[in-house]
């Protein structure tokens, strides 16, 4: 993973994804903001991936390069592969099986890319495979330590992505069935520990937004963003499965999917493997369900509307391929090598082609990168050290990150009270040197109002990029003295 992080950093791919940019900057604003602290976690996106970046993101160089998010991602992906190896070795009582599973998962080009950028998939896989390991261990030992480990892994998963919430009732049912004489105590202990994550997030949303389900139905939720707009798979199970499988063919490739299908059927003969098969199938089932019912589209280039969107959700099929490979690899080292090479053959034969997750990030960021570069170049020359900025916390934040301008030099709507004060009386309370606005955002309206009654902001640069919002850069006229901070 270290080599992958270096490779993608050197090729300029670390911060292609808009989501990666947002995750990194959310982590940064917790420690660097006009109003730093826990409230900067926000809503919708769960908090743990951002908290994992905190030891790194406080350093300007690591933040501005994106490595502050890449390092914890790589560590999580390596940890996940370790848990996957240990779990499959236990299930099949075979070191080659564990090695094959880890190799099929970790050497997939999409695993390497997502494990090298600030995304939520790496910590999710670490939590999922830890949950797999501890539940398998409980099957074999019936120990409370395994229950506690599973509970901690589960609560971590619920603080990373919402499919972690989906897993909870199934894992609780597992302990109830597999617990023997300890089934009630084991199930109770697991549920108490695993419920910590959802309880924290519900309480957070209730405290800061007066609605415990704000993350689900608030203005930044997937439901609100997608709205009622139709997309392939919405309300249609056959189409939802078709699009998810098409995304899976781009992520894992057909040989790996064939290994997943055949190996899964083969693994079911082994009673100890039935639970791992079910557990690793559940995330994929969650995404198909989300496609059908939760306003979560996936667009693939080979199907209409021929786009690139959320293809990475099919990463859930890669662990299934890893488990399928382990089922065949348990017979020996040569079988392990053969099935690993078969699952990875398309990637090895076409090694010069970028992974589909890299392609998605690169294609979808082309227009955004143009205006970010132009805005960055202008402010690098025009802004003075110590200047402050009135702006939005969105894609524009990439400009400040690139220039290593501390976020405490920016005033955004995430600095709630200060922003509301500036909005209500810009003539008295808006003193930022610059305003960088995106066409149609709230900051633009405030600047238009301020230009009528003061302070007067003069338009210095307008950036127009095809298919992108217009970016306007204003500078405050020095007609009033600037107060000391």
Image: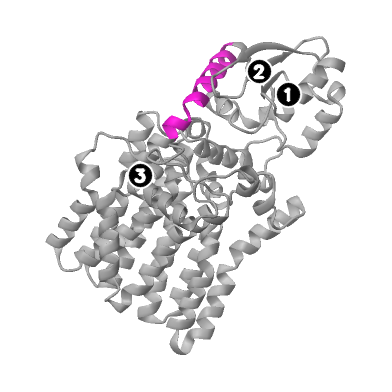
Could one spot residue 11 in this view of the protein?
Answer: yes
The mark that comes first in sequence, 1 or 2, is: 1
- Extreme residue toward the left, this view: 334
The mark that comes first in sequence, 3 or 2, is: 3
Residue found at x 50% / y 51%: 233
In this rendering, the answer to whether 84 lies above or below 58 is below
In this rendering, the answer to whether 301 lies above or below 99 is above
Q: Are marks 3 and 2 in contact (CB under 8 Å)?
A: no
Give the residue at mark 1: 444
Q: Quadrant of residue 191?
A: bottom right
In this rendering, the answer to whether 374 lies above or below 111 is above
Give the residue at mark 3: 110
- Asked if residue 479 lies left or right of residue 93, the reply is right
The prevailing secondary structure element of the residues shown in magenta is: helix
Disc on res. 304: none
Could one spot residue 485 in this view of the protein?
Answer: no
Where disc 3 sits, the SS reads: helix
Whether residue 374 appears in magenta in the rendering, the answer is yes
Q: Which residues are magenta?
A: 361-381
Q: Between residues 403 and 474, which one lies in front from this camera angle?
A: 474
């Amino acid at each position: 993973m270290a080599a992958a992080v270096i490779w993608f950093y050197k090729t300029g791919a670390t911060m292609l994804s808009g989501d990666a940019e947002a995750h990194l900057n959310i982590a940064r604003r917790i420690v660097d903001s006009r109003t730093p602290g826990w409230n900067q976690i926000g809503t919708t996106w769960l908090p743990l991936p951002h908290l994992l970046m905190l030891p790194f993101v406080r350093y300007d160089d690591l933040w501005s390069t994106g490595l502050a998010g890449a390092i914890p991602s790589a560590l999580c992906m390596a940890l996940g592969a370790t848990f996957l190896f240990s779990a499959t070795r236990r299930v099949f009582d075979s070191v080659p099986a564990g090695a094959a599973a880890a190799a099929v998962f970790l050497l997939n080009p999409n695993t390497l890319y997502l494990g090298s950028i600030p995304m939520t998939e790496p910590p999710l896989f670490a939590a999922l495979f830890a949950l797999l390991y501890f539940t398998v261990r409980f099957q074999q030992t019936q120990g409370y330590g395994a229950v506690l480990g599973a509970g901690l892994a589960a609560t971590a998963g619920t603080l990373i992505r919402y499919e972690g919430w989906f897993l909870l009732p199934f894992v609780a049912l597992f302990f109830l069935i597999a617990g023997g004489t300890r089934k009630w105590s084991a199930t109770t202990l697991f549920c108490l520990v695993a419920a910590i994550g959802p309880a924290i997030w519900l309480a957070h949303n209730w405290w800061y937004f007066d609605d415990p389900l704000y993350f689900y139905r608030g203005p930044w939720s997937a439901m609100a963003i997608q709205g009622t707009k139709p997309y392939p798979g919405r309300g249609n199970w056959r189409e939802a499965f078709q699009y998810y499988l098409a995304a899976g063919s781009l992520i894992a490739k057909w040989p790996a999917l064939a290994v997943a299908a055949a190996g899964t059927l083969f693994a079911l003969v082994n009673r100890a493997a039935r639970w791992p098969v079910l557990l690793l199938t559940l995330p994929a089932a969650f995404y198909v369900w989300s496609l059908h019912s939760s306003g979560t589209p996936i667009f693939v280039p080979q199907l209409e509307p021929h786009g690139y969107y959320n293809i990475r959700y099919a990463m859930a099929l890669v662990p299934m391929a890893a488990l399928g490979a382990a089922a065949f690899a348990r017979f020996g080292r040569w079988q392990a090598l053969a099935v690993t090479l078969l699952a990875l053959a398309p990637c090895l034969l076409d090694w010069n082609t970028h992974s589909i997750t890299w392609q998605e990030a690169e294609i979808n960021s082309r227009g955004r990168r143009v205006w970010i570069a132009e805005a960055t170049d202008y402010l690098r020359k025009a802004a003075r050290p110590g200047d402050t900025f009135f702006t939005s916390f969105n894609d524009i934040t990439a400009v400040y990150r690139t220039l290593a301008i501390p976020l405490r030099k920016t005033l955004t709507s995430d600095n709630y009270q200060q922003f509301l004060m500036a909005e209500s009386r810009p003539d008295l309370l808006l003193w930022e040197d610059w305003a960088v606005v995106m066409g149609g955002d709230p900051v633009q309206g405030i600047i238009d109002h301020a230009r009528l009654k003061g302070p007067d902001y003069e338009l210095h640069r307008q950036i127009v990029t095809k298919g992108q919002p217009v970016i306007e850069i204003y500078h405050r006229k020095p007609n009033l003295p600037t107060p000391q901070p």
